[in-house]
Amino acid sequence: MKMNVNFRRLFPTIIIGLLVLIIAACGNNDSSPETENEEGTGNKEVTLDSAMGEVTIPANAEKILAPYHEDALVALGVTPVAKWAIGQSVQNYLEEDLKDVPPIEWNVPVEQALSHEPDLIILQNNMDSYEGSFEDYNKIAPTYLMTEETVKDWRKQIETFGTILGKEEEAKKLLSDYEAKVEEARSQLEEALGDETAAVIWAAGNQFYLFEQDRHSAEVLYSELGVKQPALVQELGAADAASWNPISVEKLSELDADHVFLLALEGEQGIQTLEDSAVWQSTPAAKNGNVHIINDPSNWTNKGLIASQKTIEDVLNAVGK
């Protein structure tokens, strides 16, 4: 991706701000989807709960638009008509499957949505991050607004999308296979790490973001894989979805993690900053050569089935034995 120097410096901040906006754009409807279709297949209409009440999903919907939630579609074997993007930036970890899919801007401009001629649109429950209104999108195609619970829980997304697409059995198998993957990985990491701790830091430009215990992929690392948290991460507590502030290199001197997963694009300025910092080089992970650089942060800064699977693979490749 080509960009001038000034924009490149600003770009990580733009990305972070938009990610925070997307995560924070959640309402208060906790309804769970309930199908009223006898067979629950894509061959018939399916009526289920949404953030706008009951919605009838058309039979055999094929041209589906679900910006920022393509992870669930791809996992279920469905290629969307367009993929979420910020300019030329996309969710890189999905590009193996979506490289030929055209982008749609992150705020889903109504004219762009119309141009892709979807026959089903799936959006988040809160409309604040979108250019159009629910009525605007619903005029283009039947529009399903996920409940807050579904937005926050990727497992619920798999289940809900499975119901919408008539792929309930596929959804169940995906979740079952994932749990088996987690158990196997957890066992390997118990042997490889024991009581050693690990932290996740995102270097965006020359700023550093320490992941709280439940921020994006950190939830996979700590809650699912059972990796121990260093004291500084424990002190942070739960993530605030509405904000995420950078941490100074001086504060990172307090990070007593045995391992650090450093998320940074190749050539990112922050990598050199840490290498040149005596403060950073004095931390346990740096002194022992246990700073594991991950050059594709995209799956680590998202939540989804595929994102979680790739995060597990990154962890095992870095520290698994």
Image: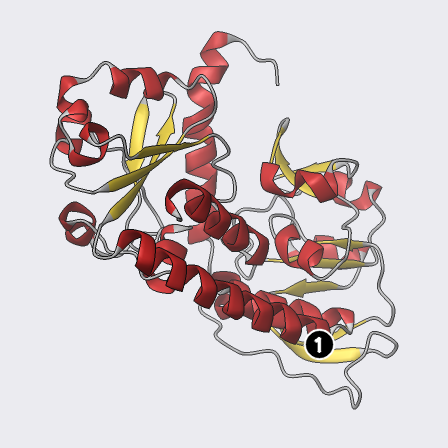
**Image spot of residue 174 (x, y percent):** 63, 68
- Quadrant of residue 244 within the rendered picture: top left
Instruction: Give, as a three-letter code, the residue at label 1.
Output: Glu
Can you see residue 52? no
The local secondary structure at tag 1 comes to: helix
In this rendering, would 138 be left or right of 262?
right
**Image spot of residue 231 (x, y percent):** 14, 50
The residue lying furthest to the top in this view is: 5
- Quadrant of residue 53 within the rendered picture: bottom right
- Compared with 173, 231 (above or below) is above
Camera-nearest residue between 44 and 284: 284
Q: Tag 1: Cα neighbours inside 10 Å, few (<14), some, or many (≥20)?
A: many
Q: Quadrant of the N terminus?
A: top right
The residue at the point 49 percent across, 72 percent down is 29
The residue at the point 21 percent across, 48 percent down is 233
The residue at the point 41 percent across, 44 percent down is 20
The residue at the point 61 percent across, 78 percent down is 33
**Image spot of residue 96 (x, y percent):** 70, 40
- Compared with 131, 252 (above or below) is above
Can you see residue 176? yes
Q: Which residue is mark 1?
A: 168
- Compared with 134, 59 (above or below) is below
Camera-nearest residue between 48 and 291: 291
**Image spot of residue 68 (x, y percent):** 60, 48
- Compared with 132, 50 (above or below) is below
